[in-house]
Image (spheres, rainbow, N blue to C red):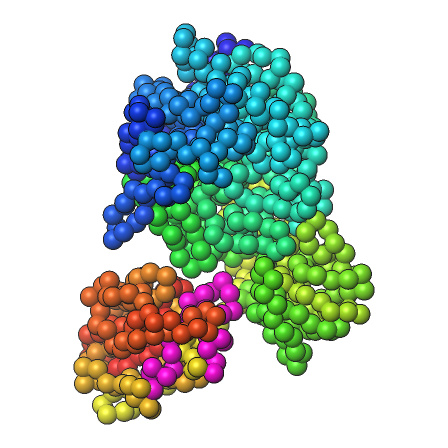
């Protein structure tokens, strides 16, 4: 067995021998000496907060400062690197990580998880006490995965430790072969069992692995939105990205047992789930509804590892491409198109709909690094696409019912778990997409419906009608051919309905992207060059003709047609504002009363210039690549832009075009509305309080900021803004 494994590794290095470009600086930054019961070991800090572009290592008072969960995965990272580059530093890092892990093993074989900053082991906390669960399984996986690197006495110590915890985990298997009934924890155990058998040929470990593999397969969904995924609950529908290594574990197990059913299960998973993830990103969780955010490195890594291993088993092109495209999440191929790693190898902690949580703890950094290692395990022909960003594509869509146009139909809001609408007997909801939908789509709905509920869906002249039937977490609502950017959903029931999310799942996916000035598409099977005009399903509509008002030598731009955000609300409307929560329908807002205190007409002066804050339903616009066009002559000495950022301080470039053909590129910078100036912009207005997302007055200082730019003595023909959905503009004046 050992000889075969070494021969396989030799072939692996020959086939995939390009240099490993991996920045380990931040991982080394997290590495530190920790006292564990009066003895020093090298471990890794669980968290590192980004404060002013510097990282501060930190723990959690009730948990600890370093843990088996993370350090075991550090051992995995370095053991996988060692397979590619036989570097003694990697072996040293593996051993010190394993020594740390072994220090937490109790006499019965089980593991504690956290150590406090005083060196005492956290033996009582719910995330640290012995439970024969996550951290025990990860310790077992790490030890087993690293056995090939050692021999002699130390290897015997590792084998003894592994067999001891293996017994603990085996005792926690239920009648179906799952640890405490859960497929996700069990998948980690299976990864360890497979590696342990590869190195020891232990028949008992193989037999346990067989039970666990069969148990995992028994949880696979055969239909529904998440067809192919594995249920992660014991008694209801539950699925999440993080920790979901079931298919990866089955692939590894197939490599030692050669039973095609395990490989076929992983293929069924990949062929159905990967396209969903390329559409939505690594969704945090799905239970009663899909919780898209926070999207974390720990989530996307599980798909990348699965795709990479599936390629290396099957040699099918599509899994090589899937590996690269899934990895491109880190390179900005995500909903807000933001990079998910730092210059020193930081894996950022989380992605939201419009911003990145750039804290970088051990788990996120490890997951990023392991993802990149998996990328090194595929050939260059796929690897080269790992930094692409999809542009126009046919992908799965999620619609929040409360954000759709209900026209004449009324409904009430229900806040159970996720915001959803409550309707009696009938409601019609309409949506206009920014692109035309092309092809057949399966319709699913989350919410609560009785057996007498029906859904009619219309797109152009096409129509489908279906009784809503429950199917693994969602209600199936029929199949519709779409050929328009407009779609209408008509719900009918003989009783009350609760409608949360509407999902459109394409029968045929299509992802389009550019690379090195060439255009390509990926249809889930192969990558082909294409003419981008072939896929002209995007609706144009971000250009606006802007007029202005002359006021005391200032030209006040009329932005009412551009406004797309309701950020200033009165006391009576305080529960309807939403300046800073793009993922919901309500959020925190500026106080209208605070503006009125400063000027009852909402006209403000600054630097001998005047500005008007509009009092419409919307009062500011989020930067989303708007183009301003001007019919009248427009020129001046200075351009003033008033606004603020949410969820941090941000900058974004914009371009001014002049009639003589010259252009001027500038950088717009707004600090966070509830913080002091981060950039060098001026504070335009300051207020003492705001309205929170529940309508409560919050005594938090908040501000609008002003940017000033010099202009050329020439008429302006247009201004083009970039997309930065955390930046808001309230007023623009030219003087």
User: Which residue sits at x=42%, y=49%?
Assistant: 350
Q: From this view, report whether residue 516 is shown above or below residue 38.
A: below
**Magenta stretch mostly in which secondary structure?**
loop
- Quarter holding the C terminus? bottom left
Reply above or below: 416 against 217: below
Q: How many marks?
A: 0
Whether residue 644 is in magenta: the answer is: no
Residue 297 lies in quadrant: top left
Residue 633 percent across, percent down from the top left:
30, 85
Residue 402 or residue 551, whichever sits in front: 402
Query: Relative to residue 170, is residue 561 drawn left or right?
Result: left
Residue 436: horizontal and vertical position, in percent? 59, 64
Residue drawn where x is 66% and y is 47% of the image = 237
Task: Please give the range of residues in magenta.
Answer: 572-596
Quarter of the rendering containing residue 626: bottom left
Across and down, in percent, residue 71 comes to 40, 30
Relative side of 533 to 634, left or right: right
Residue lying farthest front? 124
The residue at 33%/90% (across/down) is 600
Residue 391 spot, x, y in % from top left: 48, 56
Q: Residue furthest top?
A: 152
In front here: 159 or 541?
159
Q: Mark yes or no: residue 433 visible.
A: yes
| Magenta stretch encompasses residue 590 | yes
Q: Which picture quadrant has residue 398?
A: bottom right
Residue at 33% from the left image edge and 60% from the top image edge: 648
Quadrant showing the N terminus: top right
Question: Residue 719: in sight, yes or no?
Answer: no
């Amino acid at each position: 067995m050992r000889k075969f494994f070494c021969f396989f590794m030799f072939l692996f290095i020959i086939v995939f021998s390009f240099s490993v470009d991996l920045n380990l600086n931040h991982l080394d930054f997290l590495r530190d000496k920790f006292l564990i019961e009066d003895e020093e070991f090298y471990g890794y800090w669980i968290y590192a907060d980004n404060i002013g572009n510097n990282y501060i290592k930190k723990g959690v008072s009730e948990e600890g400062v370093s843990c088996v969960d993370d350090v075991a995965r550090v051992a995995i990272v370095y053991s996988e690197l060692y397979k590619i580059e036989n570097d003694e530093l990697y072996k040293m890092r593996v051993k010190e990580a394993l020594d740390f892990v072994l220090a937490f093993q109790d006499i019965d074989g089980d593991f504690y998880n956290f150590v406090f900053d005083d060196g005492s082991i956290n033996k009582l906390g719910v995330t640290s006490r012995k439970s024969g669960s996550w951290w025990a399984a990860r310790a077992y996986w790490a030890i087993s995965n690293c056995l090939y690197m050692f021999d002699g006495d130390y290897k015997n110590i590792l084998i003894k430790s592994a067999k001891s915890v293996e017994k603990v985990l085996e005792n926690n298997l239920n009648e179906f072969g799952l640890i405490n009934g859960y497929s996700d924890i069990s998948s980690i155990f299976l990864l360890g069992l497979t590696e342990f058998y590869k190195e020891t040929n232990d028949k008992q470990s193989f037999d346990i692995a067989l039970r666990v593999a069969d148990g995992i397969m028994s949880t696979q969904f055969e239909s529904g939105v998440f067809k192919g995924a594995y249920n992660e609950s014991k008694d209801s529908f539950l699925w999440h990205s993080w920790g979901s290594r079931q298919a990866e574990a089955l692939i590894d197990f197939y490599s030692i047992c050669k039973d095609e059913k395990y490989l076929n299960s992983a293929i069924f998973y990949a062929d159905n789930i990967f396209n969903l993830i390329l559409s939505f990103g690594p969704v945090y969780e799905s239970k009663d509804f899909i919780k898209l955010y926070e999207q974390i490195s720990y989530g996307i890594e599980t798909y990348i590892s699965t795709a990479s291993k599936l390629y290396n088993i099957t040699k099918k092109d599509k899994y090589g491409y899937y590996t690269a495209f899934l990895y491109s999440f880190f390179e900005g191929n995500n909903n807000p198109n933001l990079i998910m790693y730092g210059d020193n190898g930081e894996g950022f902690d989380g992605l939201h709909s419009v911003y990145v949580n750039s804290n970088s703890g051990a788990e996120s950094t490890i997951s990023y690094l392991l993802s990149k290692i998996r990328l090194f395990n595929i050939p260059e022909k796929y690897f080269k696409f790992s930094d692409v960003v999809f542009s126009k594509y046919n992908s799965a869509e999620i619609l929040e019912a409360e954000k759709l146009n209900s026209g004449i139909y009324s409904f009430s809001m229900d806040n159970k778990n996720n915001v959803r609408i409550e309707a009696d007997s009938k409601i019609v909801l309409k949506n206009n997409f920014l692109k035309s939908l092309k092809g057949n789509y399966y319709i699913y709905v989350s919410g609560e419906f009785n057996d007498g509920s029906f859904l009619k869906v219309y797109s152009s002249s096409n129509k489908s009608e279906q009784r809503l039937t429950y199917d693994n977490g969602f209600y199936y609502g029929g199949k519709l051919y779409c050929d328009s950017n407009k779609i209408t959903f008509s719900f009918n029931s003989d009783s009350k309905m609760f409608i949360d999310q509407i999902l459109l799942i394409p029968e045929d996916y299509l992802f389009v992207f550019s690379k090195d000035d060439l255009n390509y598409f990926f249809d889930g099977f192969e990558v082909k060059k294409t003419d981008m005009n072939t896929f002209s399903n995007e609706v144009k509509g971000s250009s606006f003709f802007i007029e202005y008002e002359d006021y005391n030598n200032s030209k006040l731009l009329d932005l009412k047609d551009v406004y797309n955000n309701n950020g200033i609300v009165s006391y009576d409307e305080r529960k309807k504002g939403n300046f800073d929560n793009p993922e919901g329908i309500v959020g925190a807002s500026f106080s209208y009363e605070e503006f009125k205190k400063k000027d009852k007409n909402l006209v403000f002066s600054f630097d001998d210039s005047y500005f008007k804050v509009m009092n419409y339903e919307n009062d500011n616009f989020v930067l989303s690549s708007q183009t301003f066009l001007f019919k009248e002559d427009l020129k001046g000495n200075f351009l003033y832009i008033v606004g603020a950022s949410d969820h941090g301080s941000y900058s974004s470039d914009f371009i001014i075009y002049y009639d003589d053909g010259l252009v001027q590129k500038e950088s717009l910078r707004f600090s966070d509305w509830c913080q002091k100036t981060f950039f060098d912009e001026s504070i335009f207005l300051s207020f003492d309080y705001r309205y929170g997302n529940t309508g409560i007055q919050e005594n938090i200082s908040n501000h609008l900021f002003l940017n000033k730019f010099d202009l050329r003595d020439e008429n302006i023909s247009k201004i083009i803004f970039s997309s930065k959905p955390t930046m808001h503009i309230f007023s623009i004046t030219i003087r």
